[in-house]
Image (cartoon, rainbow, N blue to C red):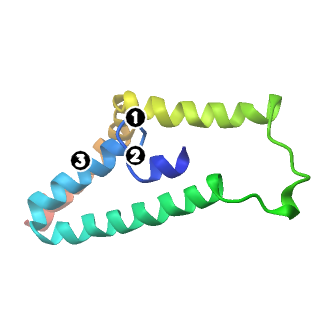
Amino acid sequence: MAAMASLGLPGLISFIPEFTIFVESFRVFGWLAVLAIAGIIITALYVLRAGANTLFGPAREEYNHVRDIRGPELVPLVVLGGVLVLGGILPSLLFDMVNSGVAPIMAHIQEALQIGGR
């Protein structure tokens, strides 16, 4: 699930930030942003191939003694997976937290720019 979130799939936590960055970079840099999008496509192919080989590839003999997780070992995976999905469905929870920290910094930057004459 983390690999899918790192690709910026809709409904997962990294989709909104990645989409916002691409929209604004396309607005500012125009067609240079297409290079960035091409890089994301190459990365997506790599991550999907690695995930497919890991999850669906042939089992290796040296790992036959390892058992699947269950019980208490499953709790962190469920919690982290829930955070990935919750952040994708309700991104305003994270945006509000980030904006509360960024707003004072931006106020200082605007003040410095006014002093500096820009």
Disc 2 crowd rating (10 Å Cα; few below 14, some 14-19, many 20+) is: many
Q: Secondary structure at mark 1?
A: helix
Of residues 100 and 6, the one nearer the viewer is 6
Q: Can you identify the residue that label 1 sits on?
A: 88
Q: Look at the numbered discs 1 and 2 and tell me whether their residues touch, using CB distance below 8 Å.
A: yes
Q: Where does residue 17 sit, x and y in percent of width and height?
A: 32, 47
Q: Secondary structure at mark 3?
A: helix
Disc 1 crowd rating (10 Å Cα; few below 14, some 14-19, many 20+) is: many
Q: Is residue 35 above or below residue 99?
A: below
Rounded to the nearest whole Å, what is the CA distance between mark 3 and mark 2?
A: 27 Å
Residue that extends furthest to the right in the rendered view of this protein: 65
Of residues 73 and 108, the one nearer the viewer is 73
Q: Secondary structure at mark 2?
A: loop
Q: Amino acid at mark 2?
A: Ser
Q: Is residue 106 above or below residue 37?
A: above
Point 72% across, 31% down: residue: 75
Image label count: 3
For residue 26, the mark is none
Q: Where does residue 19 sit, x and y in percent of width and height?
A: 26, 48
Point 56% across, 56% down: residue: 52
For residue 107, the mark is 3
Q: Amino acid at mark 3?
A: Ala
Of badges 3 and 1, nearer the viewer stands 1
Which is more N-terminal, label 2 or label 1? 2
Q: Is residue 23 left or right of residue 91?
A: left
Q: Is residue 41 above or below residue 74?
A: below
Rounded to the nearest whole Å, what is the CA distance between mark 3 and mark 1?
A: 28 Å
Q: Can you identify the residue that label 2 sits on?
A: 14
* Quarter of the image where the C terminus is located: bottom left
Q: Look at the numbered discs 3 and 2 and tell me whether their residues touch, using CB distance below 8 Å.
A: no
